Amino acid sequence: MLAMHANRLKDFLKINISDKLAEIQRNLYANKKIWNVIRGLRMFSQIYRRSRVGILLGLVFLILSTLLLGNARETEASDQKLAETIFPKAKKFVQRNPILAPDQIVAIEEELGVKLRSGDQKPAFYIPISDKKKPMGLVLFADAMGPLGVVRGAVGLDMRGKVVKVEIYEQKESDAIAADGFLKQFIGMGIDNAFKVGEDVEAAEGHEDASQAVALIPKKTLVMSYALYRKQEPKSDTEKSPEPDIPEEELPEAEDLKALMALMIDDYFIVVDYFDEKESKERAIKAARRLAKYGKGISNFEPPKNADQTEEYIYLQDRFSETLLKFAEALEKEGISDTTREQWDAIVTLVNQAHLRFSEEEIDLDTY
Ligand code: HEM
């Protein structure tokens, strides 16, 4: 028993020390790189112009939606500095820490053909926000194992899901694999690229395996971003999502789970009041839709209790949002009815269940 605790402590310290070292490394690198920002500005402004065209054309990433901007917090200074070298035009960065569901991990590993490293399983995305308050893409810090040890990097993607830049800030192989000359070949690559040395990646001379490790970093960023954030593009008019013409509403940002819940409580009471005939149907429908949107952001935050039960947490979150959308549709058609009352009761039961399982504190919504 004692030995088991000792081992756990050892593992815990190992993880934390290596995380800390990675952070210090990033910090040093970021300070050094900040001097290169001005030099890089011209190049990035061209890329940015290109990605703006992309925004008009494609809107591939769901990140664009204001929903994902809700519930975000400003980034750590060191990571932000490094992310700034990738998106120098960003006004600010917000961080998102999505939880990868076990089936997403399996799918990602299958696509990558390698196991995710423990750090990858808790990804931290940094989303650059323009002065017009729109997301410009994302930055992910990702690692890969090279022949001589871990290669740590950061990758920026634009809104079309194309690589804007790859940075390598820690590696033991050769300067050649961290040089701009080698890394710039990844710019413009996307999810359809193989990221394979000899195919669409030219290795740094004499460092084939290390070059392959570097290539895995943007690939990993793409595969993970797509698994988490890709927007489903409707294939035809009939296959469009059920709510295409609802104007995207600016939802406020929440810094943590409690703040997100505080945002949800008002909408919850709008629906409660509607059933008591103290609110209009239109406001109740809007409140239900907003709740569904807020709901989708819940798993960006770790719950204080049963944090390892990610599958159940994500399941409850998904059910919550799905049921609310169906409820909003039914409200629109039939207003207060046995069906909509039952649907709302089921939603409240689901919320109570989520609180019982994942909140440390007992929550009675009627007391708010
Ligand atoms: C109508 C929907 C919901 C409302 C109105 C609501 C409201 C609340 C409120 C008022 C709190 C207490 C916050 C505080 O202590 O300051 C809370 C906490 C919490 N809620 Fe919800 N909630 C809803 C749905 C959900 C769902 C669907 C989940 C999970 C799938 C969830 C997970 C949690 C967790 C984990 C906490 C604890 C947060 C913490 O202590 O850090 N909630 N919620």
Image (cartoon, rainbow, N blue to C red):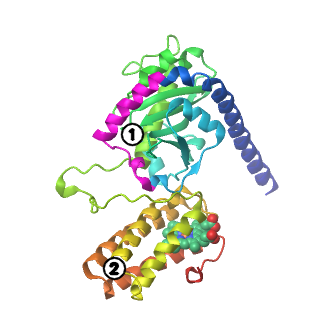
Give the class, few, some or many, for how many residues have Cα within 10 Å of label 1's Cα (few <14, many ≥20).
many
Q: Residue at x 65, y 24 (%)?
A: 32
Q: How many marks?
A: 2
Q: Residue at x 45, y 26 (%)?
A: 44
Q: Residue furthest right?
A: 2
Note whether residue 354 is visible. Answer: no
Snapshot quadrant of residue 256: bottom right
Quadrant (top left/top right/bottom left/bottom right) for the C terminus: bottom right
Element type where label 1 sits in the image: loop
Q: Which residue is mark 1?
A: 159
Element type where label 2 sits in the image: helix
- Residue 69 on image: x %, y %: 48, 52
- In the depicted structure, whether residue 288 falls above or below residue 168: below
Give the class, few, some or many, for how many residues have Cα within 10 Å of label 2's Cα (few <14, many ≥20).
some
Q: Read off the magenta span.
A: 42-67
Instruction: Say whether residue 60 is magenta.
Output: yes
